[in-house]
Image (tube, rainbow, N blue to C red):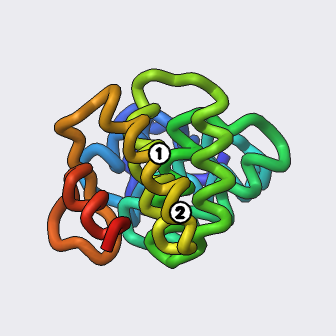
Amino acid sequence: GTQAKGILKPTGCNTVNLNDIKSAKRRGDYETALNGCNDLLTLDENEVDALKMRASIYFLMEKNKEAIEDFNQVDQVSKLSTKDLYLGADAALNIEDYTTAQMWLRRGLDMEDDYFHSSMCFLLAYANMQTSKFNDALDYLKLAEDREPNLKLPIPGFSGVASIPQLKAEVIG
């Protein structure tokens, strides 16, 4: 196998595995984790777990375009999870790709994952506001508010986090 740059194997085994990459990611050592993903992907460019991991690392590094590319590649060969759709949509919002964000968030809502539901509605409200779909934005804010009235999320253009009342005020303008 190949040795990832910076991932040391105390056992003397020189193969990279996802656990090593996850450990590096958890430590905040994104470069090492990224190198490990790249090494795995040289063996199989469609290795879904490595692509998803690399996409999430790119997202954490604020390399949003690269994250979206990896999530798109996963989408071609496998199934994106609700979490993948959420992260991909968030990355798309960061680079003002509202069409991609809206598509992925709607797909995520269709999966009926309660954990992400309110957050996805909130981000969809923001994406709809940015594309002048104000009634849709208010509808999604209502859905988010019904489930999680105190929800606050970081969204582009707001310092720190935005609450539902703050976003609603922006939509109503």
16 over 41 or under it: above or below: above
Of 111 and 38, nearer the camera is: 111
Name the residue located 37 percent from the left edge and 60 percent from the top edge: 60
Quadrant of the rendered structure where residue 73 is?
bottom right
The numbered mark at residue 140 is 1
Confirm whether residue 65 shows in the render. no
Q: What is the number of callouts on the image?
A: 2
Q: Position of residue 130 (x, y in %)?
A: 49, 73
Of 148 and 61, nearer the camera is: 148
Give the SS element for disc 1.
helix
As shown in the figure, which amino acid type bears the numbered disc 2?
A: Asn
Of 157 and 60, nearer the camera is: 157
Quadrant of the rendered structure where residue 78 is?
top right
Name the residue located 52 percent from the left edge and 77 percent from the top edge: 96
Tell me if 84 is positioned left or right of 10 in this view: right
Q: Is mark 1 in CB contact (under 8 Å) with mark 2?
A: yes
* Quarter of the image that includes the C terminus: bottom left
As shown in the figure, which amino acid type bears the numbered disc 1?
A: Tyr
The numbered mark at residue 172 is none
Name the residue located 43 percent from the left edge and 52 percent from the top edge: 138
Tell me if 83 is positioned left or right of 45 in this view: left
Give the SS element for disc 2.
helix
Query: Residue lying furthest right in this view?
Result: 77
Name the residue located 73 percent from the left edge and 43 percent from the top edge: 47
Tell me if 153 is positioned left or right of 108 in this view: left
Confirm whether residue 98 shows in the render. yes
Return the residue at label 2: 128
79 over 28 or under it: above or below: above
Dot 2: within a 10 Å radius of its alpha carbon, few (fewer than 14), some, or many (20 or more) residues? many
Q: Position of residue 57 (x, y in %)?
A: 44, 57
65 over 71 or under it: above or below: below
Instruction: Give me the C-alpha separation between circle 1 and circle 2.
Output: 9 Å
